[in-house]
Image (tube, grey):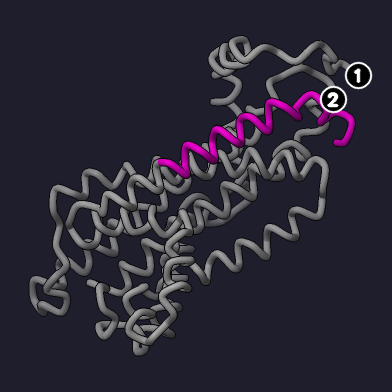
Amino acid sequence: MAEEKAKRLPLKQYAKNAYKYRYLMQEIVRKNVKLQYRNSFLGIFWTMLQPFLTMLVLVFIFTKIFGKANDGVVCYPVYLLTGRLLYEFYTQATNRAMRSIRNSASVLKKVYVPKYIYPISNVFSTFITFLISLLVLVLVMGYFLIKNQFTMQYPDLHLSWYILLAFVPIILLCVFSTGVGLILSVLNVYFKDIEYIYSVITLMLFYVTPIMYSLKTLARSGVNSIVMRILMLNPLYSILEMFRSCVLYGSMWNWNHFLYAFGISLFSLAVGLFVFYKHQDRFILYI
């Protein structure tokens, strides 16, 4: 067993290792992206096709219920697609990060590498495929913008310079996913059942995040104000609303959403790094 049982590295050296092993992380990210579509007929094209087909199915099911009657929804297909894309990135990134240490057990038992490379590289590789999947959002929104020139079906749908700020909520989501992924990767080392528990949590998260509906619709239907406030505590809600403000509504985001998303993203990353740092030397005993 070549795993070093030396004393835990000081924080300063811990940070230096991140730079020292940057090329290894790049290689792992590249490998993860390639393996994801190995032996796939559609290859990376499936990254765009899957969310597009899901959007078509859900729009077909829900458009008569939510559609234009839904307050605050400028264009329901684009509204739905933005929610699905960000939600899928979060769930895929955190799930892959959660399994990364156990999946790399054979390597970690033979050679020494900073263990945090594996969950972080899994988040980054998922982030790359997420950026590729955003192309379908560009195409779908472009279609409705062109269609709007002739039909004016969505008069409030337009582009503005605020779309250039869409990278901010995307980065916040990546930071938040990294923090959660680090925490989950530690829990998964000690408790294998966390994978099954987290699958239930992500399913619940799908329904409490306004992906297929808007909170304005819930408010109109008479949902209790306390329930509404609880739903707003969901970090994905604030990040998603920021993204939609820039892309769909053509306006500046609500600064309360930004402050909340910024704070909880940094907090999750700090907690994730701290928990991982404290437990990484004992991983070898459990994997």
Type of amino acid at the residue the image marks with label 1:
Met
Along the viewing direction, whichever of 115 and 266 lies nearer the viewer: 266
Would you say 82 lies left or right of 178 here? left
Q: What residue is shown at x 52% (from left), y 52% (from top)? A: 90
Residue 57 spot, x, y in % from top left: 45, 78
Residue 4 is drawn in which quadrant?
Answer: top right
Along the viewing direction, whichever of 224 and 82 lies nearer the viewer: 224
Position above or below: 146 against 220: above
Along the viewing direction, whichever of 60 and 231 lies nearer the viewer: 231
Q: What residue is shown at x 38% (from left), y 55% (from top)? A: 238
Dominant secondary structure of the residues highlighted in magenta in the image: helix
Q: What residue is shown at x 64% (from left), y 62% (from top)? A: 201
Q: Are marks 1 and 2 in contact (CB under 8 Å)?
A: yes
Type of amino acid at the residue the image marks with label 2:
Lys
**Residue linked to disc 2:** 109
**Residue linked to disc 1:** 1
What range is drawn magenta here?
Answer: 263-287
For the N terminus, which image quadrant? top right
Along the viewing direction, whichever of 113 and 251 lies nearer the viewer: 251
For the C terminus, which image quadrant? top right
User: Which mark is first along the chain, 2 or 1?
Assistant: 1
